[in-house]
Image (spheres, grey):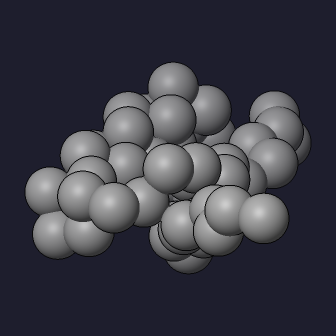
Amino acid sequence: MRALAVAAPETTPVPHGLEAGWLRFTDQVRTTRELFPHVQLVTGPVLRRD
């Protein structure tokens, strides 16, 4: 059996800004990969339009 390194960064939503929320999450994924290069899977939040 092999281990899978998973990261689940928390992000705060951008009010009325779905695209801005995804851009924020993208930045967090890049930072996660820089700080923890062994991470193989990054899970994302459910972003929805309000």
Q: Residue at x 50, y 35 (%)?
A: 22
Using the image as rendered, state which of residue 20 and residue 25 is in the foreground: 25
In the picture as drawn, the residue positioned furthest to the top comes out as: 19
Could you tell me how many numbered marks the image carries? 0
Q: Tell me: residue 24, above or below residue 10.
A: above
Residue 27 % position (x, y): 27, 46
Q: Is residue 43 left or right of residue 5?
A: right
Residue 28 % position (x, y): 33, 56
Q: Tell me: residue 11, above or below residue 41.
A: below
Residue 47 % position (x, y): 75, 43
Q: Residue at x 61, y 32 (%)?
A: 18
Image quarter of the N terminus: bottom right
Using the image as rendered, state which of residue 14 and residue 9 is in the foreground: 9
- Inspect this view and state whether residue 22 appears: yes
In the picture as drawn, the residue positioned furthest to the left comes out as: 34
Q: Tell me: residue 44, above or below residue 49.
A: below
- Inspect this view and state whether residue 31 appears: no
Picture quadrant of residue 36: bottom left
Q: Residue at x 17, y 69 (%)?
A: 35
Image quarter of the C terminus: top right
Residue 38 % position (x, y): 33, 61
Q: Tell me: residue 35, above or below residue 15.
A: below
Using the image as rendered, state which of residue 3 and residue 29 is in the foreground: 3
